[in-house]
Each structure stands twice: as C-alpha cells, then as structure tokens.
Amino acid sequence: MLLECSGISKRFGGVHAVAEVDLAIAPQQVFGLIGPNGAGKTTLVNLISGHLRVDSGAIRFAGADVTGLAPHTLTARGIARTFQGVRLFKGLTALENVLVGGHARMHSDALRRLWPRGASDRSDRERAVQLLERLGLSRPDALAGGLAYGDQRRLEIARALASDPRLLILDEPAAGMNPAESARLRELMRALVTEGLTIVLIEHDVRLVMGTCERVAVLNFGRKIAEGTPPEIQASPAVREAYLGSEYAA
Ligand SMILES: Nc1ncnc2c1ncn2[C@@H]1O[C@H](COP(=O)(O)OP(=O)(O)OP(=O)(O)O)[C@@H](O)[C@H]1O
Ligand SMILES: [Mg+2]
C-alpha cells in the first residue's frame, strides 16, 4: 500500500471530526473520498498532509511511519495536495506559482527568503510552462489573482504537480467548474494515474467520483461508514441513509 492510516482520530473540542479511520490506498489509482458536509473529509486530508496532527493512530506512507511529520517534510516525501478554498499567491504570475510548487519539494524552508527573485533555471521554467499547458493554462505570465475561478483551481493542481508527488490529494477540485471542465479534469486524473501517480479525490460531484475512481470510501460524522468500488458504494444502504436529504439522494 502507498498510504495506510490506522485508527486515526482528530477532535475539535466536542466534535469528533475524524474518528478511528482506517484507510489503505494502493498505488496507481484514483481513490474517492466522499461524505456529507462536515463529515471530516478535509480534516482527514489535513492529517495526511501534516497540516494537522492526529490525536491518536498512525499514518504510513511508502512503507515508512510518517505520523506527525511537518507538511514540507511530507511534500519532500511525495505527498502533494490542493486546498478546498484556493490558496494561490495571487500577486504572482501563474508561472511563478508553479515554480514555487517545484521549489517546495526541495527547499521549502529557504523558500520565503529566496522568493520572489531567486534563480530558477531554464529547465524549471520549461517544465512549469509544460505543466501549465497540460492543465489548459496558456498564459503563464497572467497574474494568478486575475484568473477565472476554474483556471485558479487548475493552477492549484499544476502547482501541486510541480513538486513531483507520488500521492496527489485534491480537495473538491471540480467545485465551480462547468461540465466540460470537469470532464477534462477526469481525463487528466486518468492520464496521471497511467503515468504512475496515486490520487485521492474529494468531491461532491458524485458522477465525477463514480466515473473516475477505482475505489471510494465514505465518511459520515468522522467515521468511515463504507468502502468499495463505485457500484458497491451506490448500492450501499448505509451510504444512502447518510446522504438522505442531500444531493446524492436525488
Ligand atoms: N479548525 C477547526 N476547528 C473546529 N472545528 C473544526 C475545524 N475544522 C473542522 N472542524 C469541524 O470538524 C468537522 C469536520 O469538518 P471537515 O471540514 O473536515 O468536513 P468536510 O467533510 O471536509 O466538509 P465539507 O464537505 O463541508 O468540506 C465539522 O464538524 C467541522 O465543523
Ligand atoms: Mg471539506
């Protein structure tokens, strides 16, 4: 397994945001993580990426115990993620944002001192431009803050990919995308998996999840209530019950 979470938990005051979750994700697949609002999906991602510390339980990545490591250390080991709300450097260009992502892998500590006018060599730039093109972003010199929302979301993915990850976690990447954009996102995810990447996809667009993922886990009130293939998840009474009254039930 590339990623293994064993009984991980996180509380915020009285809220058990993530409760004893076990997760085992094999390499080279898109693994879906779904659940109603407030189910604990983003908190689980924050635990895996080191942005939050587990209260209990353990996380293993690529065969090593990574529990409690800092985000930049985990990035260096190959875990990249995007954020549910876009977090770009809005005053930098699209290209510069991707270059920051690439630097994050090797010298995240020095980053703040070196940026914005550090020496990034030609190959870094060429690779960054290629990544932008792959994400359908043809204006590398456009300011990130001036891009349309869908483009900002794709720029976040390009930036995450610039760190050359083994595991890419996408927290609701299709939010605000139109159907054509989310179809292209699906194609991109499938292509990346073919190239060796493993993806964790959090998404409210159930059609996108069911049409993209090999396996899906479902959270509800912090607990994993189901896991299986998309047909198994769609047939699960526990999942239907968790989603009663929400978009999934429709
Ligand atoms: N920093 C925090 N402080 C206090 N409570 C928090 C914090 N972050 C999350 N929570 C709570 O933990 C629970 C899980 O939240 P989380 O954001 O992980 O859910 P989610 O599944 O990502 O929801 P959504 O689909 O709305 O993004 C919620 O009850 C939320 O209010
Ligand atoms: Mg969330």
Image (cartoon, rainbow, N blue to C red):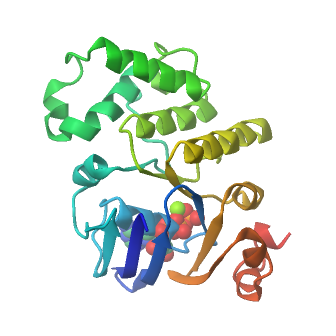
Residue 21, quarter of picture: bottom left
Report the residue that reaches farthest toward the right: 250
Residue 218, quarter of picture: bottom right
For the point 71% across and 42% down, the residue is 182
For the point 74% across and 85% down, the residue is 241
Q: Nearer the viewer, residue 121 or 150?
A: 121
Residue 93 showing in the rendered view = no
Which of the image's four quarters has the C terminus?
A: bottom right
Residue 235 showing in the rendered view = yes
For the point 63% across and 69% down, the residue is 216
Height in image: 151 above or below 96? below
Residue 231, quarter of picture: bottom right
Give coordinates of residue 49: x percent, y percent: 35, 59
Give coordinates of residue 113: x percent, y percent: 13, 29
Seen in the image, is 180 located left or right of residue 61?
right
Height in image: 135 above or below 11? above
Which of the image's four quarters has the N terminus?
A: bottom left
For the point 50% across and 65% down, the residue is 26
Give coordinates of residue 56: x percent, y percent: 29, 83
Give coordinates of residue 35: x percent, y percent: 62, 72
Q: Nearer the viewer, residue 119 or 164?
A: 164
